Amino acid sequence: MSHEDIRKKFLDFFSARGGAHAVVPSSSLIPSDPSVLLTTAGMQQFKPYYTGEADAMADFSAKNTVSIQKCFRTSDIDEVGDETHLTFFEMMGNFSFGGYWKKEAIQYGYDFITKEMGLDIEYVTVFDPEKVPAGDWRKNGVPFDRESYEIWKNIGMPEEKIVREGIDVFWGPTGNEGPCGPTTEIYLKNANGQAVEIWNIVFNEFYCDKDKKLTRAKTPGVDTGMGLERLAMISQGVKNIFETDLFAPIFDKLNSDLPDKIKRIVADHLRGVVFLVGDGVRPSNKEQGYILRRLMRRVITYAYRENLKNSPEEIMRTIVSEYHGMYSNLDALAIEEVYAQEYAKFIKSVGVGLKELEKLTSVDAASAFRLYESYGLPYEIIKEVAGTKAGRLVREEFDAEFKKHQEISRAGVEKKFGGHGLLLDTGELKAGTPEEVAKVTRLHTATHLLQYALRKVLGNEVKQMGSDITAERARFDLSFPRKLTPEEINAVENEVNAVIASDIPVIMKEMDYDEAMKSGALAFFKAKYPQRVKVYSIAGVSRELCGGPHVEHTGEIGKFKILKEEAISNGVRRIRAAIK
C-alpha cells in the first residue's frame, strides 16, 4: 500500500468514528510551547485541550481529532545512517479530550491494524510499576494498567502477547510539564522477522508539574502516535524505512555506488532541511537555526566529497514535489535560495577544513570545536572523517566546548529551556534582564496594534493563533488563507506606526469575563479565562483580554517593522516583527 493510500485510509477511518473525529492539519515544526525546541509529537498542538486551557468543542466542534503531524527529533541526528533512525518524520494520531477512553481507543487501534490494513499484531504492551526502576518518579502513584490489560484480553489477544513493561510505556510530559500517563503499544513483525513498535496509544490520566509531581487529570484524554514511515515499511513488506516509497524518489537521485549510510543521511537531512525551511527556520548558531545549519553543512560536505550526480537542490525539488500535495506551504524556490546562501558561506571553507582535519594526529572536543568554529565543519563530519583519531570524542564534550565559546547563544538557550535567570516568563513573553523586560513589554503592546492593523487591512476574519515574544523579535500567528502582498504588509506597518505616532494611552481595567465579552474585547482563541479578567484598551484601536505587561502610551513602542511573513500550516500564517 502506498504512503498516500495509508494517509487517506487513516484519516478516513477516524473521521467516520467516535462521533466523527475532526481532521486537523499539521501544526508547524516551530511549536507554540516555549519549553520545547521543535515539534516532536502530534499531541503538542493539542496540549491546551488536555490541560483545560482550551475547549475542543469551541475550536473543532468535536471532542475528538485526527491529524498527520510533521515531527522532528534532534536526539536522533547522530544515529541517522542506520536502518531505523530519522530526524524528520510524520506522526499519524487520533486524540480525544474527554470524548472516549481506553476501550474505544484500543478497539480503534486493533480494528485499523487488523481490518483496515490487513496486518497481524505480534504483541502489545501495558504499563506495570513493578517494571519501573527504584527511585524513578513513575514508580509510585501509577498503578498497573489492568483496564488496558483486560480490554486486550477481551478483544482476543493471547495473554502471552500482552507484555508488561515499565518506563518505556509511560509517556510524557512533552516539555517541562504537562499531561502524561501509561501507554499501550502495538508491535508488528517486519520483513526481517523483527517486532517493531508501530502505534503508541497514550492515556493522559495525570498532569506532571515541573517537580515531577503527579496529580489526576480533571478530564482524562487519549493521545496516540503511529509513524507513517514504519507503517509503510510493514505494509510494503520491505526490510527498513529507507526501502519504502517515501524514500524511493530521493534514492533515485543519488549515486547508486554511494554507501547506504551516506544515502540515508543525505535523504534524511534533505527532508529535514525542506521542512524546517518551509516552516520558517533559517540557518544560525542557536536553537532551531543551529539544527538546520548542521543538516545543511553535513549535506554540503557529502556533496563536496562524493560528487553527487544530482545536486542537493535537485533532490530537494523532488522532495517538495512528493510532499506538496500534503503540505502546501513548501516552496521549492524559497528553500533552494536559503540553501544556496548557506552553501555560499560554507563551501569556501569546507575543503580547507577537511585538509586541516586530516593533518591532526588525534581529535578531542577542543580541536573538534576549533574545526567547527574556524571552518564550519559539523561534529558528525569531524567524527566520521577522523575515524580512529577521534576515538574518544563524544557529542557531550563537543557541545560543552560549543557552549563555553558561545556565551550569547548559551544565555539564549538557557532562557528558552527551563527559564534560568528569567525576570519575566509568561510563556508568551520571555526576558532575562530589566532592559529585556522593557523591550518585550514594548513588543507585546505592538502585537496588539499588529492584530488591529491586520484586521483593518485584511478584514475581521483574521484571528490570532498564537504569539511568542523575546527581546529580539515578536512572532505572531494568524488565521489567513493566503500570502500577504507587499502592499498589504506595507499598509499593516503604516497602520501600526501611525498608532504609535499618535501616542495613545494604554488603559487597563479589571472586569468580569462576561462583561468584557459584551464590551467587544477580543480574546485569544485557545485561552481559558478566569471569572475576573484584565482588559487592555487603546482608544479607537484595540480592546483585548490580556495579562500584560504593556506600555503606558503607544509612543513608547518605537518604530515597528515586519521582518518576514510566511505560511506555517494550511490557513495559518506567521509574521515576525521587531521594533527600533
Image: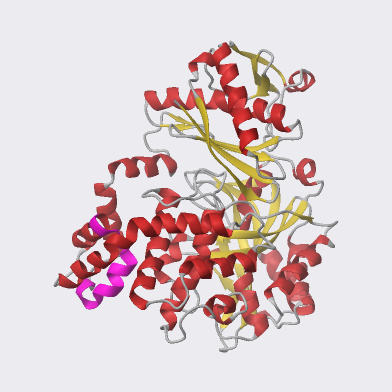
Whether residue 87 is situated above or below residue 442 in the rendered picture: below
Residue 98 image position (x, y, % from top left): 75, 50
Question: Which quadrant would the C terminus be assigned to in this image?
Answer: top left
**Residue at horizontal 57 percent and vertical 44 percent from the top:** 32
Residue 577 image position (x, y, % from top left): 52, 34
Whether residue 11 is situated above or below residue 196 in the rendered picture: above
One can see residue 315 in this view = yes
Between 140 and 477, the one lying in front of the other is 477
Classify residue 149 as left or right of residue 303: right
Residue 539 image position (x, y, % from top left): 67, 12
Classify residue 113 as left or right of residue 498: right
Which region is colored magenta? 374-390
Q: Which residue lies furthest to the front in this view?
A: 487
Between 557 and 490, the one lying in front of the other is 490
Q: Does the magenta stretch include residue 262?
A: no
Between 339 and 82, the one lying in front of the other is 339
Q: Toward which corner of the image does residue 478 lie, by quadrant? A: top right
**Residue at horizontal 39 percent and vertical 60 percent from the top:** 343
Q: Is residue 381 magenta?
A: yes
Residue 549 image position (x, y, % from top left): 53, 22
